[in-house]
Image (cartoon, rainbow, N blue to C red):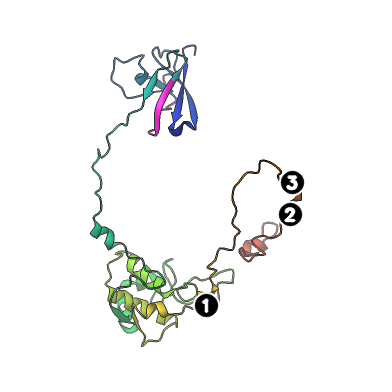
């Protein structure tokens, strides 16, 4: 142990220092089972690049400089990446056309909705082929896949059913989600007319639109969803800043709690059956 020396790892910015015990040159005092040798050519014993790091502590790739302490010469060792940038040749830069192909988000205003249309009657056949296997023939959900229909009035109960009809605030979200993520086994493969038809069918199953309703870029944003007004669109939490007080600070004993999440209707007082359990029963 008398030949041990300390290595101080200087991280980027010099903000954090990490120390590790290491042996250099004569490594006879280092436990053989605990030493992990850095990958350097043989014949460089004693050089700062051939230090054996104790218990597998090696330079992280974000460490730029390792400084040896105790040598008296202030010698610096610069870390070099194991491989060059772009060494593995994985991936390519996407083209503007590829990026545009996935710039498909549809906000509540209906922006980005494409041309096309669909009805519930057309959507029924598409749903049976692509959706019923997971969501059930009537949107009831099956095999632990989400329920799409029902749940009206359940959101305030211990077992809320968050369906398109009971929970979703915008019909444009229905179109957007189907378009980008459905069907589950082949997302983003449905044509705009098919997505419009499925949107019309699911909204009709929830009793939100009539069977004769035609879904298109103009009509979908105008749909008033049942739960639209139950969403809190403004963050009620106060704006705070993490500024430390340095003088004339308020005494902690004078601070009083005037409100909490429960009284502001942000968090329910009861979250389910667990709240009613007593004595482990």
Q: Are marks 2 and 1 in contact (CB under 8 Å)?
A: no
Camera-side mark, 3 or 2: 3
- Residue at numbered disc 1: 152
Camera-side mark, 3 or 1: 3
Mark 3–mark 2 distance (CA, rounded to whole Å): 11 Å
- Residue at numbered disc 2: 256
- Residue 264 at x, y = what percent? 64, 65
Camera-side mark, 2 or 1: 2
Q: Is residue 83 above or below residue 207?
A: above
Mark 2–mark 1 distance (CA, rounded to whole Å): 40 Å
Residue 211 on the magenta segment: no
Q: In the rendered structure, find residue 57 and report the number of the disc placed on it.
A: none
Mark 3–mark 1 distance (CA, rounded to whole Å): 50 Å
Q: Secondary structure at mark 1?
A: loop
Mark 3 or mark 2, which has the lower sequence index?
3
Mark 3 or mark 1, which has the lower sequence index?
1
Q: Secondary structure at mark 2?
A: loop
Q: Are marks 3 and 2 in contact (CB under 8 Å)?
A: no
Residue 60 on the magenta segment: yes
Residue extending farthest to the bottom is: 212
Residue extending farthest to the right is: 253
Residue that appears at 50% across and 78% down: 226
- Residue 254 at x, y = what percent? 76, 50
Quarter occupied by the C terminus: bottom right
Q: Secondary structure at mark 3?
A: loop
Other residues around mark 1 within 10 Å, as few (<14) / some (14–19) / many (≥20): some
Q: Is residue 41 above or below residue 149?
A: above
Q: In the rendered structure, find residue 251 and report the number of the disc placed on it.
A: 3
Q: Is residue 26 above or below residue 17?
A: above
Other residues around mark 2 within 10 Å, as few (<14) / some (14–19) / many (≥20): few
Residue that appears at 35% across and 79% down: 218
């Amino acid at each position: 142990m008398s030949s041990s020396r300390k290595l101080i790892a200087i991280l980027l910015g010099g903000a954090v220092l990490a120390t590790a015990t290491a042996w250099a040159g004569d490594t006879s005092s280092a436990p053989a089972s605990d030493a992990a040798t850095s990958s350097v050519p043989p014949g460089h014993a004693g050089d700062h690049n051939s230090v054996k790091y104790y218990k597998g502590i090696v330079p992280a790739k974000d460490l730029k400089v390792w400084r040896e302490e105790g040598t008296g010469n202030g010698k610096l060792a610069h870390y070099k990446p194991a491989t060059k940038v772009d060494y593995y040749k994985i991936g390519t830069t996407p083209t503007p056309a590829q990026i545009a192909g996935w710039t498909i988000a549809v906000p509540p205003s209906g922006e980005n909705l494409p041309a096309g249309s669909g009805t519930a009657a057309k959507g029924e056949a598409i749903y049976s082929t692509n959706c019923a296997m997971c969501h059930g023939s009537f949107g009831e959900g099956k095999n632990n896949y989400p329920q799409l229909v029902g749940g009206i009035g359940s959101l305030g109960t211990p077992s809320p059913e968050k369906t398109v009809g009971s929970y979703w605030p915008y019909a444009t979200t229905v179109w957007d989600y189907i378009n980008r993520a459905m069907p589950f086994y082949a997302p983003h493969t449905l044509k705009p007319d098919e997505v419009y038809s499925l949107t019309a069918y699911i909204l009709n199953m929830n009793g939100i639109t009539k069977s004769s309703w035609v879904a298109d870029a103009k009509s979908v944003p105008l749909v008033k969803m049942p739960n639209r007004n139950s969403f809190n669109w403004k963050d009620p939490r106060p704006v705070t800043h993490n500024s430390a007080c340095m003088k004339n600070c308020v005494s902690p004993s004078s601070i009083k709690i005037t409100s909490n999440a429960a009284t502001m209707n942000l968090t329910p007082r009861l979250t389910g059956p667990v709240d009613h359990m007593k004595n482990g029963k």
